[in-house]
Structures are given as C-alpha cells and as structure tokens.
Amino acid sequence: MATMAIRAPRVRSDDIFFPAMALLTLVIVLTGFAKTYFLAGMMFAKLPNALVHIHGAVFISWILLLVVQTSLVAAHKVKWHRKLGVLSLILIPSMLILGVLTLFDFVRRVSPDEHPEALFVGDLETIILFVFLTTWALLARRDAASHKRLMILATMAIMGPAIARWNVSIPITLGTIFGLPLLVLAYDLWTLKRVHRTTIVAIALTAAWTFTVLPFSNLPFWHHTIEWIRRT
C-alpha cells in the first residue's frame, strides 16, 4: 500500500518574532501595573473610580487579543484569526473613547500645581497614534507583512504608561519607548535586508511624539484646555 508523508508546516521567522513581540508587550504591561492593578486583585484593586477600572480591563483585553492573534497566525489558524479579528472593531474605538475620558478624569483629579499638561498631551498623542496605526492595519489586512507590523508597532506605542511605572529615570523611560520599534527595524534588516515602510512610518511618528511632547505641551492652548476640562 502506498503511504503518504504528511509534512509539518514550515516554521517561518515571522511565526516566532511577532508572537514574541506580543508577549513582550504583555510582560511590560504586567510588570508596569503589577503593584497597582494585577497583584492588587484587578477588579478589586483600589483605583480612583469605575471608569479607570473599565479602561484597564479594555486595554489589557487588547494586549491579550494581540497575543492570541499572533499565536493563531503562527499556528496557521488564519480562519480563526480573521473571525477573532472582529473584536478589534470593538476594542479600538473603545480604547479611544475610554482613553480620552480617563485623561479628562485624571485632569479633574490632580492639583493644578502638578502641571498635568505634559502628561495630558503625551497620552493624547499616544492614543491618536495607536488609533491611526491600528486603523491602517485593518485597512491593510490583506497585506500580511504590513498588517502584522502595524498591529505590533501600534501596541508598542501605548506602552508608555506601563514603562513609566517602572520608576526609572526619564531618559531610560523614553529610551525604552523609542527602542521598542527598533526591534522591528532590526528584524526587518535581518529578514528583508531593508526596513519595511510601515516600520519607517511608525518609528518616525514615535520619534515625533518623543521630541515634541514637552515643547508642544507648553503651548498656551493646552493650559486653556486643562482649565476648560476642570470647569466641565
């Protein structure tokens, strides 16, 4: 009787790298918010209000979705990946709305003497960057190389609050935030012998955020915005 040899699916470098990057973002979030959220019992953690609880739950849901989605692609379960991807259409706008509402709530809770303009502007730019890159990723979902890079790079862009809670110096914090996309750049150079266009755009936008937050937040417009939020 003739026998048929069943070949195992070939393991691609993408099947290792992108799930590893997704896991890296999960580790960053777990370590950054371990004391105040995860080890504090998550839903039982003593957070300022219910809005912050919902915000945290939705954002960690995104990280977990990214881990699952990259793992499904690596396991060649593309149909499951596409079906589960519908959740991103719910999570992305939810993260935008909750991110902005949480920022407004933060401004109302802090003292005016703490000058929250820099944090407000920085987080607002980060949310906008995340939405831009993930929306681009969804539009480019038939281009696998662009899609997976954009999703990873978008998630790396929102790692700032978690990294900031490591309680390290500002240069190390900013260096880590800016250094994460460089891992994707290095991977591009290793596998493609060039830098993918989506990697270039994400790094350029991350650099723009890094170097413009402080001068941009000093504009009078943001001081007036903070005052308006406190009055509403």
Image (cartoon, grey):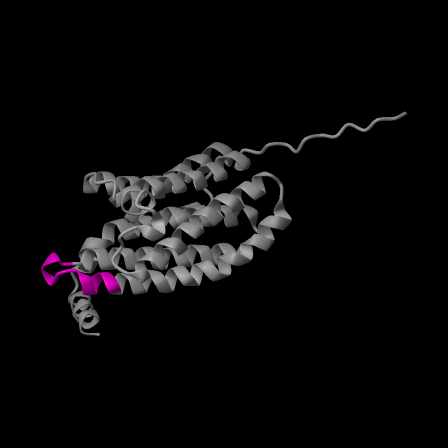
Is residue 158 among what the camera can see? no
Viewer-nearest residue: 83 or 196: 83
Q: Extreme bottom residue here?
A: 232
- Range of magenta residues: 105-115
Residue 35 colored magenta? no
Is residue 161 among what the camera can see? yes
Residue at the spot 66% in from the left edge and 33% down from the top edge: 9
Q: Hey, which quadrant is residue 169 in on the image?
A: top left
Name the spot of residue 198 as percent of width and height, x first. 45, 49
Question: Is 215 drawn above or below residue 5 in the view shown?
Answer: below
Q: Hey, which quadrant is residue 103 in on the image?
A: bottom left
Residue at the spot 56% in from the left edge and 53% down from the top edge: 84
Figure label count: 0
Is 96 situated left or right of 137 in this image?
Answer: left
Q: Extreme right residue here?
A: 1
Q: Hey, which quadrant is residue 35 in on the image?
A: top left
Name the spot of residue 106 as percent of width and height, x first. 23, 60
Is 198 situated left or right of 218 in this image?
Answer: right
Residue at the spot 48% in from the left edge and 49% down from the top edge: 65
Question: Is 222 drawn above or below residue 13 in the view shown?
Answer: below
Name the spot of residue 70 as percent of width and height, x first. 52, 43
